[in-house]
Image (cartoon, rainbow, N blue to C red):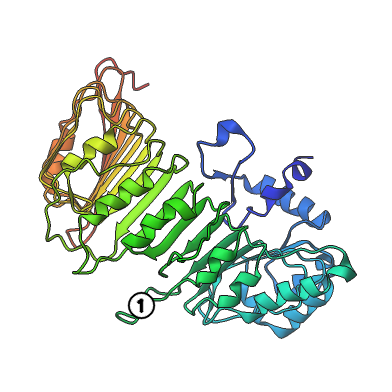
Amino acid sequence: MYIMRYQRNLALFNRRSIFTFPWSVPFREFKTCRLHSSWRYVCRVEAQKKKFYHILKKLVEGLEDGVKGQHCLCLENNLLFSIKEFRQSVRLKCATSTHSLLFFGAYHQYPIPIGDDFKLLGKLDALNLRLYTFPSEILTLVLFSFLFFFLILTLVLLKYLALTCNGELPTTISKLFNLQVLIIHPHNNIRICRVPSYVPIQIWDMKELKHIEILGKSLVAPCRPASLEKLSTLVGVNANICTILEFSRKVPWITKLGVQIELTPYDDHNDLLSCFGCVSTHESLKILKCSIINPVFKYDYAFSSSFLLPPWLKKLHLSGMGFSWEFMDVIGSLPFLKVLKLRAYAFRGPKWEVREGSFVKLKFLLIEDSDLVQWKPTFGSFPKLTFLSMKHCYKLEEIHWLPHLRTATIELVNCNPVALTCAEQLQPGTNNFINVTVTSSFDEKPITISFIRYGPEFDSD
């Protein structure tokens, strides 16, 4: 059956009815797909019968025998675990069989006990629970499983951990030596001035890690020889320029890198360019996200040949750089770039003149919080662009559209009203059309205007 064939993907059938298709090449262009509610119900029923995946939404469901022996528990009502009667019933019936515990209910801002009775827990997703500190019972779970290795003959260690907590990560986190995915989100981003929060240096000893997503904490590279050769994703961490320069040696097979850089008045801002030159040596890097936390535009960056990027990049997100638009020639020459997002004055200047024949595969372009006045593509550039979004560009006055550009959607959010007039006069190419959506919140009541501009010989029927 379909259920048995794609069991690993059933755990993604959350309350939004969204799941991914990693097994089929044609679907790799899509991040998520929606599942019809009827088919979703069938999947849930069959998964429950096979003791693979069980949904807990009501109090009575935790007291019934159907929960006994389930391998994966998904709570769509997180408050249930705060009820002692419910929690004890679930632990009694399936604590020794549950491998995955997923809290997919609405976000709950008060701590809920997770407990240490799930001896074989391999996956814990508690992003929708707020924890004041890192739960010590998680380390107890793995240690307990290790001690019982000879008794149960099946050692299932924690491989996936996702939490929301503002506390410090313990140095003993390295005990999770089989962990592959580590996701830590803060409840809020408020922190004491000049008191950084660090990721424990012991994280470099966790050789099985493939995905690290720790928001708001600083990552420091150790002086001793250490590397995470299996790490493919590192996002959300704060890093200084020196740390980024070390990444090329310590994470050789990284495919997705997202860092936040906090510059100080004593930093040489030109060193920022050397960071890009360093990561450009990563041929495996496909997605790069880099943002300046506290951008101060005191310097005008003259174009430099030291600005380099990995040649195989497919997605690039930049924020707060303050570069001139001349640097875009380097980005436009990337042969595989499909998504480009520029936020918080990533590039400055009134006019962006795109070089001819650049951005040959770009499909999505976002420009947000910019002083751009004129966006002018040249012939042969953006031949595959299908979505152009400009947000909070208060000086924007001109948008040019050439006949060679494909059918596309243009989104203008809180931009200069003159840009709307310009968009209404755009002329698509033959057999093409432009779908324009303009949103403005300048007035008391936000307004949205949508219209379509058809090109010559276009058959709207």
Q: Quick check: can you spot residue 127?
A: no
Rendering quarter of residue 408: top left
Check disc 1 and give the amino acid type.
Ile
Q: Residue furthest front?
A: 224
Residue located 68% across and 82% down the image: 83
Residue 202 x %, y %: 55, 70
Image quadrant in which you'd find residue 204: bottom right
Q: What element carries label 1?
A: loop
Residue 80, percent from left and from top: 66, 76
Q: Quadrant of the C terminus?
A: top left
Please give the residue where the numbered disc 1 appears in the rendered image: 190
Report the number of discs.
1
In the rendered view, tell whether residue 428 sits above or below residue 185. Answer: above
Q: On the image, which quarter does residue 36 sit in?
A: top right
In the picture shown, does residue 71 fall above or below 190?
A: above
**Seen in the image, is 337 located left or right of residue 178?**
left
75 with respect to 326 (left or right): right
| Residue nearest the observer in this picture, 337 or 87 | 337
